[in-house]
Image (spheres, grey):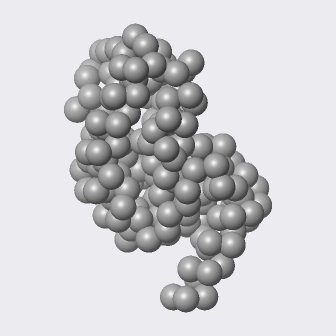
C-alpha cells in the first residue's frame, strides 16, 4: 500500500497520515520533514536563502526519491506538492491519492497560530488577510487536488472513515 495525502496547509495530512500508517502498519513519511532532514535547514530558511523555485525543485526531487525507496507507506505531502513539476502525475501513477478537503474557515483556525512558520502564509498579518490568501491559493490548487481518486471531507475525515473509504474504493476497482 502506498497512500498519498494531499490538501491545503492545515487540512490534517500529517495527523491523519500518522494514524493511518499505524493502523495499516506501514511507514509514515512527511515530505516536508524529509526535505528538511535532507537540507539540514528549515523550510523558512530554504525559502529565505534560495527562494520558492529552488524549494519546489527540491520538493519534487525528494518526492521521487521517497517514492523510489518506499514501496509501502503513507505520505503526507506539502500543500503545494501536487501543483509543481508534474508531481500530481507521480502521485497518481505510483499509489493511491486522497484529497483532504477542509473548509477554508477551518483551515484559518488551524494555521493562524503557525502561519509565521509557513513561508507562503507568514506575510499575512491578520485572520482576514490569511483567509483571503487561503481562498485564493485553494482556487489555484483545486484543479490538482481534484485529480485525486479519493476525497475525504473535513472533520469527518478520521482513520476509520478513510479505512472505510479505501475498502469501498478497492472493492469497486
Name the residue located 69 percent from the left edge and 64 percent from the top edge. Answer: 161
Residue that sits furthest to the bottom in the current view:
172
Residue 167, compared with residue 27, is above or below; it is below
At which x and y percent is residue 91? 40, 62
At which x and y percent is residue 78? 44, 41
In the image shown, does 32 or 150 lie closer to the viewer? 150
At which x and y percent is residue 16? 65, 50
Residue 168, compared with residue 60, is above or below; it is below
Q: Quadrant of residue 123?
A: top left
Name the residue located 51 percent from the left edge and 88 percent from the top edge. Answer: 173
State how many labels appear. Answer: 0
Residue 32, compared with residue 25, is above or below; it is above
Report whether residue 27 is seen. no
Residue 79, compared with residue 23, is above or below; it is above
Name the residue located 55 percent from the left edge and 60 percent from the top edge. Answer: 152
At which x and y percent is residue 103? 49, 44
On the rendered structure, is 157 left or right of 70? right
Q: Quadrant of residue 169?
A: bottom right
Name the residue located 52 percent from the left edge and 21 percent from the top edge. Answer: 112
- Image quadrant where one finds the N terminus: bottom right
On the rendered structure, is 135 left or right of 169? left
Report whether residue 11 is seen. yes
Amino acid at each position: 500500500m502506498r497512500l498519498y495525502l494531499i490538501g491545503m496547509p492545515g487540512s490534517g495530512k500529517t495527523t491523519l497520515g500518522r494514524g493511518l500508517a499505524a493502523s495499516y502498519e506501514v511507514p509514515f513519511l512527511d515530505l516536508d520533514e524529509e526535505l528538511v532532514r535532507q537540507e539540514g535547514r528549515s523550510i523558512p530558511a530554504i525559502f529565505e536563502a534560495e527562494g520558492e523555485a529552488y524549494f519546489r525543485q527540491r520538493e519534487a526531487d525528494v518526492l521521487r526519491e521517497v517514492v523510489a525507496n518506499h514501496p509501502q507507506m503513507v505520505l503526507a505531502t506539502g500543500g503545494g506538492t501536487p501543483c509543481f513539476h508534474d508531481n500530481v502525475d507521480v502521485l497518481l501513477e505510483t499509489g493511491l491519492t486522497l484529497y483532504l478537503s477542509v473548509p477554508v474557515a477551518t483551515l484559518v483556525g488551524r494555521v493562524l497560530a503557525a502561519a509565521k512558520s509557513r513561508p507562503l502564509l507568514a506575510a499575512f498579518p491578520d485572520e482576514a488577510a490569511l483567509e483571503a490568501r487561503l481562498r485564493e491559493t485553494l482556487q489555484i490548487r483545486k484543479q490538482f487536488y481534484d485529480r485525486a481518486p479519493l476525497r475525504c471531507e473535513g472533520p469527518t475525515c478520521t482513520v476509520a472513515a478513510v479505512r472505510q473509504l479505501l475498502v469501498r474504493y478497492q472493492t469497486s476497482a
